[in-house]
Amino acid sequence: MTKNLQLILLGAPGSGKGTQAARLVAENAFNHISTGDLLRAEVKSESELGLRVKAIMDSGNLVDDDTVLELLKKNCDLKSSSYIFDGFPRNEAQAKALDEKVLADTPSMAVYFDIDLDVLEQRIVNRRVCKGCGEIYNLLFKKPSVEGVCDKCGSTDLELRKDDNPETVKNRLKVYKESTEPVLKYYQDLNRLSRVNAAADSEEVFKELLNVINN
Ligand code: AMP
């Protein structure tokens, strides 16, 4: 793997970016940075920023570019670490800002998690997140061993994320199509885009991902 490589994971919400990022973090020298997680932490702490973005997030729309970019810059140090960017960039302006204001000369690669959007809608509404430790489950293909109990920490609080409800999911996928699909073209045109088949099972996707990163 290229030294100091920064990895940009692209794909619709629910395409498996978060799950695969967690595996890469566990097995490689990557740190995970998710703008969705950073924003949710702000909402939870009821910071000024959190209070400002809560309603936008609950509706599935995008938070403004400057806010997200500032939050991102505050939380990563590219000189000393390799990061996986998950959920950023979400539009072409963010992709350009990432190149110009954050990455500069740091080597990077974008990977597209390719999957049909109708399949995704079902995946997302069946997703559950452990309130205790953040472990992600899916009632279709990654159930906890005992129904309703987290395998990792034993919490019985496995919840549907607020923005994973069917109505918001439809809007998030619409926003994805309109805003984020052009980002694929941005990286494709610069010859910096690789692809994995995100409809395959998790093990297979991970293998493909390692292959892409190491070649
Ligand atoms: P995620 O967990 O990545 O699906 O993000 C959840 C929500 O956070 C999104 O629906 C947006 O409201 C907001 N969000 C996350 N990342 C970004 C971003 N890069 N730009 C704008 N809004 C974002």
Image (cartoon, rainbow, N blue to C red):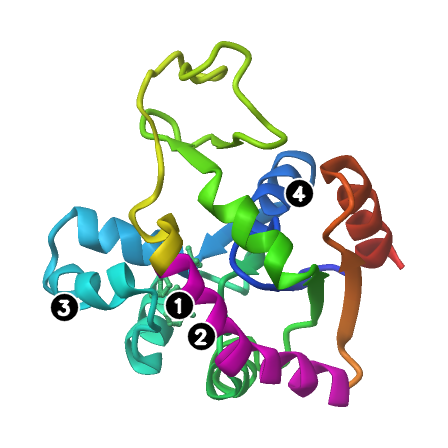
Q: Nearer the viewer, mark 2 or mark 1?
A: 1
Magenta stretch: includes residue 184: yes
Which image quarter holds the N terminus? bottom right
Q: Which residue is mark 4?
A: 24
Q: Which residue is mark 1?
A: 171
Which image quarter: residue 170? Answer: bottom left
Instruction: State the image coordinates of residue 49 (x, y, percent, origin top left).
Output: 16, 65
Give the mark nearer the N terminus: 4 vs 3. 4
Instruction: State the image coordinates of residue 122 (x, y, percent, origin top left).
Output: 55, 47
Tell me which amino acid carries mark 3.
Arg
Does residue 27 appear to the left or right of 14 in the view shown? right
Identify the element where label 3 is drawn. Answer: helix
Instruction: Tell me whether circle 4 and circle 2 mark residues in contact (CB < 8 Å).
Output: no
Task: Give the CA separation, mark 3 to mark 1.
Answer: 20 Å
Does residue 65 appear to the left or right of 147 in the view shown? left
Please give the name of the residue rendered at 28% of the width and 52% of the height, measured from the top-left corner: 40
